[in-house]
Image (cartoon, grey):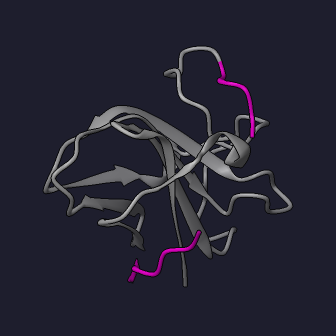
Amino acid sequence: MLAGCSGPADADAPGTLDGSDDPAAAAVQITGVVVGFVGMGMVVENHSSLTLKSVAIVVNEGGAEGGYRFRIQELGPNTTNTYLTQVFRNPEGESLDPDAVKVQKFALYADTPEGRGVWRGAY
C-alpha cells in the first residue's frame, strides 16, 4: 500500500549524508513523490522531473520511538526504489520492524533547485 497524499529532527548521525530532516528547515513543498510500505520494504517513487539530493526518508516522524530515518545521496527523476525496512533506524539505532511498529506516516526531505523541501504522506 502506498501513501499518496501530501501535506504542507535530528542531527545527522555518523556515516550519514548531509541534509536536514528538521521540518523548520524545509521551506519548499515537494510534489510528485510517493512513499509506501510493502512487505518488508519501503517503496519510494519520484514521478517528478527533478533530481532530489541529500534525501532523508522518515517513517513515523514525531512518534514515540522518535521516527525511523534513512538517507540517500539522490533520488533521480521518474524512478522507483525499494529499501529494506531494516535500514531505517531510530535515534537509538534500532531498525524498523514492521511486525512490531505500525507504519503510519512518511516524510521525505530533499534539496531541490528552490531549496530544502518536504513531502508528507500517511495511511
Instruction: Please state the horizontal and vertical placement of residue 24, each as a whole percent of the image.
Output: 72, 45
Based on the displayed image, in which of its 4 quarters is residue 30 positioned?
bottom left
91 above or below 107?
Answer: above
101 above or below 25?
Answer: below
The residue depicted at 69 percent of the width and 49 percent of the height is 23
Instruction: Please state the horizontal and vertical placement of residue 13, each as a whole percent of the image.
Output: 66, 22
Residue nearer the viewer, 34 or 23: 23
The residue depicted at 23 percent of the width and 40 percent of the height is 51
Residue nearer the viewer, 94 or 73: 73
75 above or below 60?
Answer: above
109 relative to 25 in the view: left or right: left
- Give the main secondary structure of the magenta stretch: loop
Q: Residue furthest top?
A: 14
Is 58 part of what is drawn in magenta? no
Number of numbered discs overlaid on the protein picture: 0
Instruction: Please state the horizontal and vertical placement of residue 120, each as a whole percent of the image.
Output: 54, 66
Instruction: Please state the horizontal and vertical placement of residue 122, each as a whole percent of the image.
Output: 56, 78
122 relative to 63 in the view: left or right: left
Residue 56 visible here: no
Based on the displayed image, in which of its 4 quarters is residue 40 positioned?
bottom left
Chain part drawn in magenta: 1-13
108 above or below 35?
Answer: above
Q: Residue furthest right?
A: 64
Residue nearer the viewer, 16 or 76: 76
